[in-house]
Amino acid sequence: MTDGYSPWSKFNAQGWSILDARRQAAALAPAHIGFGVPEGESLKQELKGVWCASDDGGKTCWGFDHFVDDRVIEACGRFPETGQAFHAKGEYEVRGRTICIVVTESDDPKAFPLGSRFCAEVLHISRVQQRHRFTDTGVEDTTYRRPLSAMQCPSGSATTPNPSINPDAAR
């Protein structure tokens, strides 16, 4: 502007600038939101709770992943392509930014073969969503955080544990 007036001039006179505002926002935000992903034990803590698998940006959920504790994950829902219900349980571990899961219980051995192991690298995690890439296929996916009360598993199918599966295989 030719008159020297800027909408920021009032703030600049008080010592504020756009850069100062960005620094303050960055200092108040958790470090992993937009600035990286926590690793190891910190990532485990961020994962705890329920995540919604969705084809419409989280408006509806066709499946749920529940990180129950530091080791157990449960999954349930209905596959959107077929409507087939599923329930599965596994043991997981986190190394760096990678989550690896070994299936220990499953009611659908085609979708979740007992003893199968798969891994995903967490690319982004926040209070509302998680983006990850499966290491075997390179496919990226986004899930959305939900309260435990929102987890709705179809009834009628029970998971079958396989005692021969070594839960320590996730390690």
Image (cartoon, helix red, strand yellow):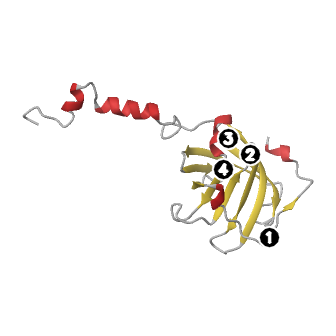
Measure the C-alpha gap from mark 1 to mark 3: 29 Å
Figure quadrant of residue 8: top left
Q: Residue at x 67, y 51 (%)?
A: 136
Residue, disc 1: 157
Seen at 56% across and 66% down, the residue is 60
Q: Earlier in the sequence, mark 3 or mark 2?
A: 3
Which image quadrant for residue 26?
Answer: top left
Residue beneath disc 4: 49
Residue 109 in the figure: left or right of residue 29 = right
Task: Answer with mark 1 or mark 2, whichever residue precedes in sequence.
Answer: 2
Q: Which residue is mark 3?
A: 44
Q: Amino acid at mark 3?
A: Lys
* Residue type, label 2: Asp
Q: Earlier in the sequence, mark 4 or mark 3?
A: 3
Residue 34, position in %: x, y?
Answer: 48, 40
Q: Disc 4, disc 2: CB below 8 Å? A: no
